Amino acid sequence: MGKQFIKFKGFTNVECEFYPCHEGVKKEFNCLFCYCPLMERECPGPYKVFTDKYTNIRKDCSECSLPHDGIEQSWRFIQMWIATAPVWDRTPQSSEKIKKYGQLVKTTFDHKDIEWATTQVEAL
Ligand code: SF4
């Protein structure tokens, strides 16, 4: 049905005092995933690992633009990874991990789920 139903997939808040908070975004900036849903999952982003003041191991995602690059593109990216990627093992990012989990997401995600979600919204 087109663009009018894209709203649930994201938005750009140009009035945010932190906008644009990440560099390297090439398409429409998606602010919907300001707190990335993949923080506790394996992901393909260029995160660094640090220990916070409560001694929790966390991701520093300053250099990642994946949840923000393009409304449609970033929405699809998050749907695929959140549905299929395992819980983050709290180890640093590596090309081996990206390859392993990228392959897993690619082979296990059912693309019909995305079509289903879109048709549900279009039917409203
Ligand atoms: S590295 Fe990117 S995709 Fe991964 S959790 Fe951080 S913001 Fe999300």
Image (cartoon, helix red, strand yellow):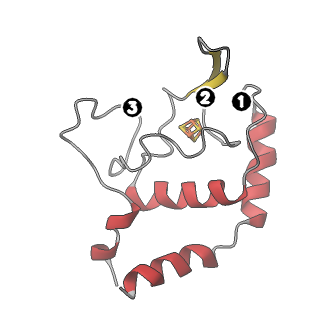
Q: Residues within 10 Å of mark 1 (few under 14, many from 20)?
A: some
Say which element carries label 1. loop
Residue at horizontal 54%, vertical 79%?
Answer: 115
Quarter holding the C terminus is: bottom left
Question: In the image, is residue 114 above or below residue 21?
Answer: below
Ranked by sequence position, the earlier of labels 1 and 2 is 2
Q: Quadrant of residue 15?
A: top left
Category of crowding for the residue at label 3, using alpha-carbon neighbours closer than 10 angstroms: few (below 14), some (14–19), many (at least 20): few
Residues at marks 1 and 2, CA–CA distance in whole angstroms: 6 Å
Kind of residue at badge 2 = Tyr
Question: Which mark is drawn over residue 47?
Answer: 2
Badge 3 vs badge 1, beta-carbon distance below 8 Å: no
Q: Position of residue 93 (x, y in %)?
A: 71, 29
- What residue do we see at 46% from left, 84% from top? 119
Please say if 80 is above or below 24. Answer: below
Three-letter code, disc 3: Glu
Front-most of residues 26 and 85: 85
Q: Is mark 1 within 8 Å of ligand 1?
A: yes
Real-space Cα separation, disc 3 to disc 2, in angstroms: 14 Å
Dot 3 falls on a residue whose secondary structure is loop
Q: Farthest residue toward the front? A: 54
What residue sits right under mark 1 in the picture? 93
Rendering coords of residue 65 (x, y %):
47, 39
The residue identified by callout 3 is: 23
From this viewpoint, which residue is outermost toward the top? 53
Image: 93 above or below 80: above
Q: Residue at x 38, y 45 (%)?
A: 26
Q: Earlier in the sequence, mark 3 or mark 2?
A: 3
